[in-house]
Image (spheres, rainbow, N blue to C red):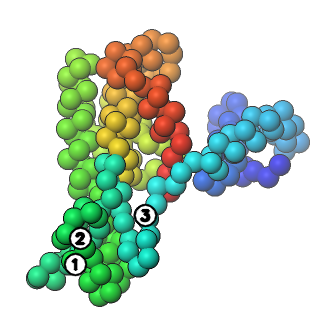
């Protein structure tokens, strides 16, 4: 079985499945033969996780003909150019998008559009995530924490020991209920820094439908 090996000061072997395939993190003094043996004992689990990963829906733009559509909060959006030559975004189903969409496709370089769209996504992510954090922090009866946008390739969110939450900006491409699940999940780590039964009880207390949202979120791949 092919895998990427990384050495670290950790005392146990760790296996991660992601967009780069199988990554193994092993102690500095563990022999290659022992690493191979341990990986082989996990072969069935690894193959199962690889199949799950490969079946995930990538977060990519949708192209229909010459038009490129961008998902945000469950809707599809289309860039256009206004009368002053400035880019803007409109719902793909709107008249404004239909009138001006082809101009953006025909006159702007793809790299310029992608850069502008990434900034547009992140601007909306900051606003949306801040609002959702405030809502669920109130439900959890904790102060709204500081948060930062993340560009991680394997995580939707994280919470460190200092109480700083990182949320992947690509979450803004998903429906709002999935953003809410990640927000609720990370906020609960302010109280329980693990995934114990106590942690999941906290999550259920502020986001009861978390099992369904968790399963749905796992069907998406960060890319």
Residue labelled with disc 1: 100
Q: Position of residue 211 (x, y in %)?
A: 47, 25
Task: Name the foreground residue: 215 vs 192.
Answer: 215
Give the label, 3 or 2, closer to the camera: 2
Report the Cα–Cα distance between label 3 and label 1: 18 Å
Secondary structure beneath disc 1? Answer: helix
Query: Answer yes or no: do the residues labelled 1 and 2 have beta carbons within 8 Å?
Result: yes
The residue at 85%/38% (across/down) is 40
Residue labelled with disc 3: 61
Report the Cα–Cα distance between label 3 and label 2: 16 Å
The residue at 64%/37% (across/down) is 9
Query: Where is 138 relative to 127, above or below?
Result: above
Residue labelled with disc 2: 97
Is residue 153 something that shows in the picture? no
Q: Quadrant of residue 133?
A: top left
Mark 1 is surrounded, within 10 Å at the Cα level, by few (under 14), some (14 to 19) or many (20 or more) other residues, namely some
């Amino acid at each position: 079985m092919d895998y990427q090996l990384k050495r670290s000061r950790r005392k146990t072997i760790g296996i991660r499945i992601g967009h780069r395939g199988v990554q193994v993190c092993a102690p500095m003094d563990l022999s290659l033969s022992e690493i191979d043996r341990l990986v082989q004992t996990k072969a069935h689990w690894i193959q199962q996780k690889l199949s799950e990963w490969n079946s995930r829906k990538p977060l990519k733009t949708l192209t229909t003909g010459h038009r490129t559509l961008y998902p945000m909060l469950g809707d599809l959006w289309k860039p256009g150019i206004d009368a002053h030559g400035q880019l803007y975004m409109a719902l793909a189903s709107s008249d404004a998008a239909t009138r001006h969409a082809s101009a953006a496709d025909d006159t702007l370089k793809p790299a310029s559009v992608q850069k502008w769209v990434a900034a547009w996504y992140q601007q909306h992510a900051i606003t949306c995530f801040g609002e959702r954090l405030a809502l669920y922090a109130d439900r959890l009866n904790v102060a709204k924490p500081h948060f930062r946008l993340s560009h991680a390739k394997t995580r939707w969110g994280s919470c460190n020991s200092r109480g700083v939450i990182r949320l992947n900006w690509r979450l803004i491409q998903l429906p709002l209920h999935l953003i809410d699940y990640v927000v609720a999940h990370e906020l609960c780590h302010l109280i329980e820094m693990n995934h114990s039964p106590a942690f999941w009880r906290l999550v259920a207390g502020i986001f009861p439908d978390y099992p369904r949202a968790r399963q749905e979120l796992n069907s998406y791949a960060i890319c």
